[in-house]
Image (spheres, rainbow, N blue to C red):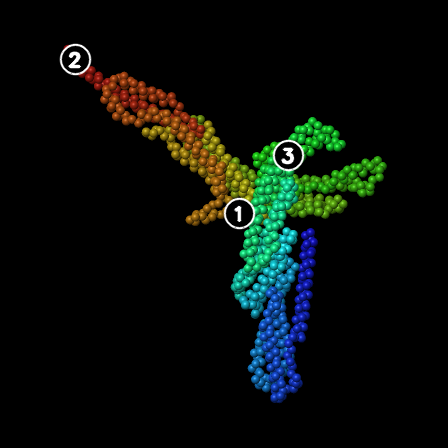
Amino acid sequence: MPGEAAEYHSIQLIRDEFLMNVQKFASHIQRTMQQLEGEIKLEMPTISVEGEVSDLAADPETVEILEQCVINWLNQISTAVEAQLKKTPQGKGPLAEIEFWRERSATLSALYEQTKLPIVRKVLDVIRESDSMLVANLQPVFTELFKFHTEASDNVRFLSTVERYFKNITHGSGFNVVLDTIPSMMSALRMVWIISRHYNRDERMIPLMERIAWEIAERVCRVVNLRTLFKESRASAQNKTSDARNTLKLWKKAYFDTRAKIEASGREARWEFDRKRLFERTDYMAAICQDLCDVLQVLEEFYNIFGPELKAVTGDPKRIDDVLCRVDGLVTPMENLTFDPFSIKSSQFWKYVMDEFKIEVLVIEKEAKNFIDESFKTLRSAEAAFDMLLKFKHIRSREAVNRQMMMKFNDILAQYCKEIDIINKIFVQNLENPPLCKNHPPVAGAIYWERSLFFRIKHTILRFQEVQEILDSDQGQECSTAAEEPSTLDRGAVFAINFSPALREIINETKYLEQLGFTVPELARNIALQEDKFLRYTDGIQRMLDHYHTLIGTLNEAESVLLNDHSQELLRVFRSGYKRLNWNSLGIGDYITWCKQAIGKFESLVHQIHKNADDISSRLALIEATNLFKYPAAKSEEELPGVKEFFEHIERERARDVDHMVRWYLAIGPLLTKVEGLVVHTNTGKAPRLASYYEYWEKKIYEVLTKLILKNLQSFNSLILGNVPLFQTETILTAPEIILHPNTSEIDKMCFHCVRNCVEITKHFVRWMNGSCIECPPQKGEEEEAVIISFYNDISLNPQIIEQAVMIPQNVHRILINLMKYLQKWKRYRPLWKLDKAIVMEKFAAKRPPCVAYDEKLQFYSKITYEVTRHPLIKDEHCIRLQLGPLANTVQENAKSWVISLGKLLNESAREELYNLHEEMEVLNRCV
């Protein structure tokens, strides 16, 4: 239990603290005794030194004895100091260094304290008074003693401040203690580095750090023992290796964090220690611990795969056990290592072991995939296999094997189809004479039998609905037609009243039995007497829960995430109803009141959020309903707007509508800020709690703009291909060609620009910054050009929109090609304007044609004029109306000009003939 574990952990901490305090007290007593008694005692003079110093100095015999005594003292002190300097710490850990300095401090303190005794001082005064030769040797020895004594005392004092941390690292109950200790220890070492007069140099601090690293490494070696590690529970082994890895990494991290603080201060000497000495071994051991974590993770993944569920589904437990034996054998080489895996010298051997492990893992993975492929062809139960696959979706297992498992849904569906066929066969076979359960009447028994068959297949299909992609497949659709699909989906926590129907039956039975005179148990009578209270409570709770479930049912997914904290607060109010209260409690009425108040408060918040959401939805609906292709109405039944007028009118109306849409869009941000004020009581527009809500509405805006553009393009394309003409173009004669006015390239260009501008209106809708509803400011692009991040960047890449935007100009171009083909028939009149009239008339007159030839020519051109009048002057091709009137008038005028030219030529020819005839008659008249 979590509570028991926490209590056990606190007891361990108290025990460790008590043991460390007892050990510290014992060391204090021992050190005090050493200082009082001293291991080295100075030999005192054998003569009396009472009297005046001058008198004693005047006595040669006394001086000689005292000189010999002082010589002995100097030898003792020098010998003791040299012995202490030759000593080294007895151990490789940091505590050994503290004990080393304490021992030196105790020894030198004892000597130093003896030099301060009155008799010693008087002897030294006598020697100085007598001007002895020893005076020159006294000062260096005593100075050296003082220096080393002071150094030892200071070191003991400063190292005592970190002794507690060293003991935690050495003797702490677990890695959690070490992990908590290392950062504090580094801070304490920094203070020692700053304040101490001796541990502020690299040659002192580096060995101490090295001892700490050694102690941490040795502790990891002791705890992470590969011979026993894999025999422990997987959770325990994983905790050990991960804690060991984290401890080794934290040692390095804490060092560099403290080093960074020292450098940032700028006032302290920097830590430029030899990193190889401090971290080479710990870094390597951290890598080994990571390898062990990976190994344990691989084992856990395999155990997760080849568990009892797979055995139950596949029906081949022996083969699964064989695979598990191979999985267990993965760590056998590690348990029987002949080298120390934590030794850097053995790195190549360890690498070889890990490579062999990875190769064997791949082999087992391949075998597992083959086994799964074979097993899922002969499934026992579709539902059991489905449950197992769902479990694999939510637990960590081998990625390759898990991927293979996720591909087996089709096999499950095939098995389910077989089960449906079996059920159907049973139903058909026993339809006329269904099997009945004991004591069941014929009709009810038959219904019960039929329902039991139905529920056997319905239960499985209900489970399949938990993974929608299964039912979306072809085989899933086939299975769905064979079973009824429920359409209910629970959202949020669902509560029910824990009042058994048996209690109601007991109450009714008790009342009727008492009326009949039977004796009923006292407990049943007490329950019956409280019937009104129970009914009042259950009714009140049921109404309250119905209100809650209805309210929760109104929330969509985004609102559920938005109001998660408020929902949890509401559930905390509910908690006493399913944790503490029972039907004998006195506070049920108050509990119902509190719950109703909490639900009312939550409902008020939900209603306000829904009101703002409705406001946003209404604005988005207005945007989505906008018509971006408002074309001008026809001027009359026969006269339509021109091409340029048509597209310019659409652009003007579109610009006006875009202004309205942008205003509606800009109003969404303040509404979301209002929601932020309701939920988190801020109005920044970028509350982290609302990040998913902002994203929800931004997706909605994107969907609305995509539908807007796609719907308008599709609508305009339908108008283009419709049979109602929208605009007109004229046909004019520009000798020698018949062309449209405006020409086809201009019409194509205007249509293309109109469609492109329709898509580019999304540039006015600026995207929000990540995690906010604030518009993204312009960004600097290439050549310092301001780039506006809008929805256009995404919408313009939509395949459907691209398809429609390309299709519309293509359809218009196709219509124009059809019109140009229609105009080909007018090309038969091309001689009217293509030939040079003067040259043709001159050649014709030169032939001196008879009047019959003139008549034929005149009738030909008159017929052309008549034919042109019979041609329709309007041609409708889908959305374009072709006005042929100007072309017909031009053709008629050209034909008439030919008739006039022929008339003039005939007139001149006839006149010339008349003149000739007149002259001939005159000649004949004269002759007569």
Give the residue at x 16% y 14%: 923
153 or 308: which is nearer to us?
Answer: 308
Q: Earlier in the sequence, mark 1 or mark 2?
A: 1
Hey, what amino acid is under mark 3?
A: Glu
Residue 45 in the image: x percent, y percent?
Answer: 65, 83
Q: Which residue is mark 3?
A: 419
Q: CA distance from mark 3 to mark 2?
A: 128 Å
Give the residue at x 48% y 38%: 799
Quarter assignment of residue 178: bottom right
Q: Which residue is mark 2?
A: 924
Give the residue at x 20% y 17%: 915
- Image depth: mark 3 or mark 2 in front: 3
Q: Earlier in the sequence, mark 1 or mark 3?
A: 3
Q: Secondary structure at mark 2?
A: helix
In the displayed image of the protein, which residue is found farthest to the top? 928
Q: Secondary structure at mark 3?
A: helix
Hey, what amino acid is under mark 1?
A: Asn
